[in-house]
Amino acid sequence: MIIYNGILYPLIFFFALIASIFSKKIRDSMVGRYRAPSILKEYFKEKGPNSKIYWFHASSLGEFYQIKTILEGLKEGQDDLVCIVSFSSPSGFDNAESDAMDLKFYIPFDFPWTVRGILNTVGPEKIVFASYDLWPNLVWISRARGIHINLFSVRIKKGSLKLRVLIKGVFRVIYSSVSSIYTISEKDMKGLCDILGDAQGPRLRVMGNPRYDLVMRDAIQFRDQDVGDMKDRDLRIIIGSAHREEEEHLISAMVDLMNTYPDLRVLYALHEPSESAISEIKKKFHDQGHVGTVFRKKTELALPSDRLVILGVVGILSKLYWQCKIAYIGGGHSTGVHNVMEPAVARLPVLFGPRYHNSHEAEELMANGGGFCVRDKDELLSTTKKLISDEKYCKITSLAASDVIYKNVGSTSEMVRYVLSD
């Protein structure tokens, strides 16, 4: 606690201030954190006392999707429950939506005096963290006040820094101060127990990932409509959430494939589709002989018949997978692979780069035969060509992908029960 408050957090705060000068996302987060105490005071001044308050925290939008079904499940049977949700990232704060969320705000700074003031204002019965992004002073001071702290959807991936000797000790101190921890899998539980050692404290459960339930629920209308066989879909590859680090081999591979298969279409979605990034991608394809059309519709989602379509809007990618046959999901050559559940539930074989151990779902897809790690252009080409040329193989892998989703649904109701009772 002394090291964190005397050295680590002041350094984190200082470097974040410097970085905010150059990054709008960090600047927005810092301003939001600064304003959080006054936002909370105003909200609870109007709300009045005697409310049953659960405070959820999600680092970003992906973690909010893990929270969402739990929020909605809690609100169904608890009319008096107030659910507030904090975020660290603008991508979560700006895009998270749910009728079950009574208030969203940026998580306040983790200075002890700020945390004490916030807890006095909010008076939460429970604080629930999604996956990670635990703030030590919030954990320690809440625990000292008898507030239940829950951490769920925990992953301890292979080679995690948390398992290294010195860092393990830090996380042992933090995790042992949490009231209850729910891991996604038995493997994650073993890693967690390795970190905790003989430390006493948290109640441990293996609970799965509630995001599977959200993906399945959101796909209902498409599953009902999509009764035809995969062979009835257009031969289209979708590149989802592509990062700059993988552009070179992705573009080169897609050009080779389009030149080899005259019927092949490509839908290319950037991770951050700014106008400058879209123009740059269009030019790179154009330089290799393919002209791209930018798709910007948010309601009428029938894709044009152009061989190359570049997605120019956000928030609709999950709906477009159902018009494709093969998916490549980005991030596996930089920060870690993005959401592979949405293409899997749409019955697409899912390809991704080598940094996929951040995603339990990607590991499940590979183990079940519906996911493929492709490390470079050559592996991407050979895997894709086999899927295109062998219709039976493509169908087997597509069903294997969707089977992973079906096998993992159902954790939300159990998790809601334990969040209430633990």
Image (cartoon, rainbow, N blue to C red):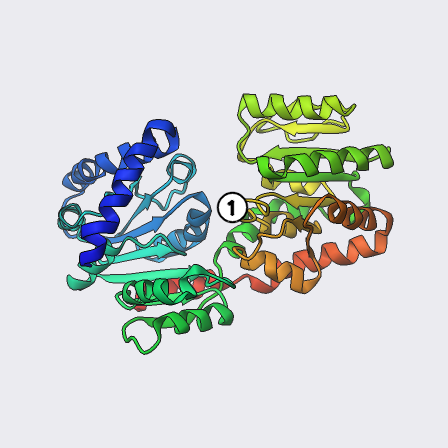
Q: Position of residue 356 (x, y in %)?
A: 58, 54
Quarter holding residue 392: bottom right
Q: Is residue 320 left or right of residue 338?
A: right
Amino acid beneath label 1: Thr
Q: Is residue 122 above or below residue 167?
A: above
Q: Residue at x 66, y 56 (%)?
A: 402
Front in this rendered view, residue 340 or 276:
276
Q: Is residue 206 left or right of residue 142?
A: right
Q: Residue at x 55, y 36 (%)?
A: 271
Q: Position of residue 37 (x, y in %)?
A: 19, 39
Quarter holding residue 362: bottom right
User: From this viewpoint, is residue 421 visible?
Assistant: yes
Q: Is residue 343 left or right of residue 412?
A: right
Q: Residue at x 50, y 68 (%)?
A: 185
Q: Is residue 16 above or below residue 292?
A: below
Total residue callouts: 1
Q: Position of residue 211 (x, y in %)?
A: 50, 54
Helix, strand or loop status at disc 1: loop
Q: Is residue 186 left or right of residue 11?
A: right
Q: Residue at x 52, y 64 (%)?
A: 158
User: From this viewpoint, is residue 296 visible?
Assistant: no
Front in this rendered view, residue 265 or 225:
265
Residue picked out by circle 1: 335
* Screen quadrant of the N terminus: bottom left
Q: Is residue 200 above or below residue 412?
A: below
